[in-house]
Image (cartoon, helix red, strand yellow):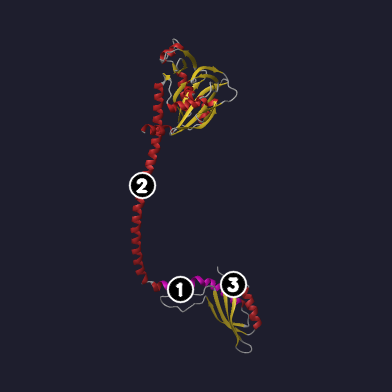
Amino acid sequence: MLQDIKTYLLFKNQYCGIEHTSKNGATRLYVTVLNKKKNEIDLKKNAEADSIFELSNILPQDIGVSLLINNEHVITKKVENNVSEPQKLVNMAFPNINLNDFVYEVMPQKTIHFVSICRKDYIEELIKSYKKSKISILKVNLGISTLSSVTTFLKTNDVYTANSSIDIENSEIISIHSNEIVSPVSYNINGLDIANTHLLSFACALSYIINNNNFSNFGARENELLVEYTQSQFFKKFTKFALVFIFSLLLVNFMFYNFYFNKVEGLQQTSLINQHSKSKIIGLSKKIEKSEKIVYDILHSSSSKSSYYLNHIVNSIPSSIQLSQVDYQPLLKKIKSDEPILIDHNIILISGDSTDSEMFSFWIKELEILTWVEKIEIIDYSDLTNHISSFSIKITMKND
C-alpha cells in the first residue's frame, strides 16, 4: 500500500519511455507515455522529436523516463551458448573489454543471448542533456533489450521497429537486422495498437511498469538517479504542501480574527446606540432652536428664487391689473408645535383685480410662455362691478 502511494506521488501513474535513435544519420526521438490505472494500462501519448530541446516542449517538465539508447553508439552482439551468467556472456561477446569504461546490458534467453554495450561517458552526457531540458532519466536500456517485455504479446515472427527488423521464434528473439523501414506497421499488444516506430519506446515504458529488467552494470547509477529524482520531487511537493499549509494557517487566523472582530464590532455598535440615545435626549432640549433654523433655512434658500420669479411676474403685469396678494410656496396647513412645516413646493398663488378681461387673458398667456412655468390654473374670476373683476390664479413651476 505504501509502495503504491510512493509510486503514485513520484509518477502519478504515468510512465514514459524514450527511444533515442537515429534515422538517416540524424537524431530521432520516439516517445510513448503509458497511464496505469489499477491493473490496466492505457496509451496516453505517442510523439516524435528531432532534438531533446524539442522533446522538452512535448513532455511535462521534470518527468521521470526510461531511456532506450539505440543508435550508432550502441553495439549489440548475439551469443549462442547455454551459459546464463551475464559476466561470462559479456566476455564472450566482447573479449578483453574494460567494463569500467562501458555500460553493458544482457538480454538472456534459452540459448541465444544478446549483449549490448555503450560508453559510460556518452550515457552520462546524454543524461545531462536530458536533465537540462527538465527531463529526468531514471533507467537506461541499450539496443532493443526492452523488446523482451512484449515478445509474448506479438502474434508474428517478423517484427519491425523504427530502424530494424527482428526475427522471433517461440517468443524469443533470434536475430536483429538493421535497415530502414519504409512502410508503417501496426501491432496489437493486449488491445493497444502500437506503430512499429513506437514499439521500442512502448516496450521501454512497459518494462519499467512490470519491472522486467535485464542484466546490466548500470544498476547502481540508476539507483542514484532514482534517489535524485525522488528528492527533487519530494522537495517540490513539500514546497507546495508548505505553501498550502501556510495559506491554511493564514485562513484559520483570518477566521479567528474575523470572529473576534465581529464581537468587538457588536460591542462598538452597542456603545454607539447608547451614545445615540444620550444624544437624542440632549437633542430634545434643542428642538425649538432646530425648528427655527429649519424655517430660516427654507426662507433663505428660496429667497433668491422667489425674487427671480416675482420679478418676472411684476414686470409682466399690465396697467389694468392690480395685485392684492402674492403667496410663494404657500403653507399647506398652519404651523403647529411638534409638527413638521409643510409647504406647497413649486407653487405661487396670486390674487388681485382686473379692469380689462382681454388684457387679463393676454397676461396669462405671457406667463404661460415663461421657461420656468409648467402650467397656470385660474382658480377664481368673478365680476365685482361692471368694470372690475376679481381673480385668483395658481402658477405651478417646473422642478429644478
Amino acid type assigned to the residue bearing label 3 in the image: Glu
Residue drawn where x is 36% and y is 51% of the image:
258
Q: Residue furthest bottom?
A: 385
Instruction: Check disc 1: other Cα within 10 Å, few if <14, some if 14-19, many if 20+.
Output: few
The label on residue 295 is 1
Q: Quadrant of the N terminus?
A: top left
Residue numbers of the magenta segment:
290-315
At a point 35% along the width and 66% down the height, the residue shown is 277
| Amino acid of disc 1 | Val
Residue found farthest to the top = 96
The residue beneath circle 2 is: 252
Q: Residue at x 65, y 78 (%)?
A: 362
Amino acid residing under circle 2? Val
The residue carrying mark 3 is 374
Q: Residue 140 in the image: x percent, y percent?
A: 45, 23
Q: Residues within 10 Å of mark 2 (few under 14, many from 20)?
A: few
Q: What secondary structure is found at the residue carrying circle 2?
A: helix
Q: Secondary structure at mark 1?
A: helix
* Cα–Cα span, label 1 and label 3: 26 Å
Q: CA distance from mark 1 to mark 2?
A: 57 Å
- Pick whichever of labels 1 and 2 is earlier in the sequence: 2
